Image: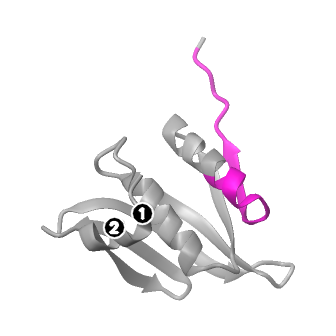
Amino acid sequence: MASSEHLSQQFRVTHDKLGPGYHALTLSNKDDSHLARVSFENHTNDDGNSQIDIDYLKSHQEGKGHAKALMQHLYDRYPKSSINWGLTIHPAATHLAEQFEDKYYRRTSYEPNHDTED
């Protein structure tokens, strides 16, 4: 994957405030095409620590690393926050959450969807 400096030259991230504590980040290319989007709630948890709960993560071009780059931006933007991915329904989301858990073990939580087809 390209370095973050290289990514910043190719892409831009816009931050939208959706309501009190609710936000969205959108990764776009220079042509302003939306590549990935994450919506989340930023709040203080019961322990008094900053927590981000992911509501929705969508890559519009799967397999190109856009969701990963956007989530890296989220982790970098909120370095003191724990990030709860919630239930990861899609296998690609589970794989991505696992990668971030490996990198940010104390800051990442998720619940993989274990539904199997018989």
Task: Report which quarter residue 33 is drawn in.
Answer: bottom left
Q: Is residue 86 left or right of residue 46?
A: left
Q: Position of residue 8 (x, y in %)?
A: 33, 73
Name which residue lies at 56% across and 84% down.
21
Determine whether label 1 and label 2 are within 8 Å by CB: yes
Magenta-colored stretch includes residue 52: no
Tell me the amino acid under the disc marked 1: Ser
Q: In the orientation shown, which residue stands out farthest toward the top? A: 118
Instruction: Give the Cα distance between marks 1 and 2.
Output: 5 Å
Regarding mark 2 in the picture, which secondary structure is present there?
helix
Q: In the picture shown, does residue 91 fall above or below 52? A: above
Outermost residue to the right: 47
Measured as percent of width and height from the top left, residue 115 is found at 63, 28
Q: Residues within 10 Å of mark 1 (few under 14, many from 20)?
A: few
Residue closer to the observer: 41 or 97: 97
Name the quadrant of the C terminus: top right
Q: In the drawing, does residue 100 fall left or right of residue 15?
A: right
For the point 39% across and 50% down, which residue is it? 65
Instruction: Determine the secondary structure under disc 1.
Output: loop
Q: Which residues, given as a range, are shown in magenta?
A: 100-117
- Note whether residue 60 is visible: yes
* Residue underneath mark 2: 6
- Report the number of numbered marks: 2
Q: What crowding class fits label 2: few (fewer than 14 Cα within 10 Å), some (14-19), or many (20 or more)?
A: few
Judge whether residue 57 can be spotted in this image: no
Q: Residue at x 60, y 79 (%)?
A: 78
Q: Which residue is mark 1?
A: 3
Front-lying residue, 100 or 93: 100
Where is residue 59 shown, x and y percent of the image?
36, 52
Instruction: Kindly identify the amino acid type of the residue bearing the numbered disc 2.
Output: His
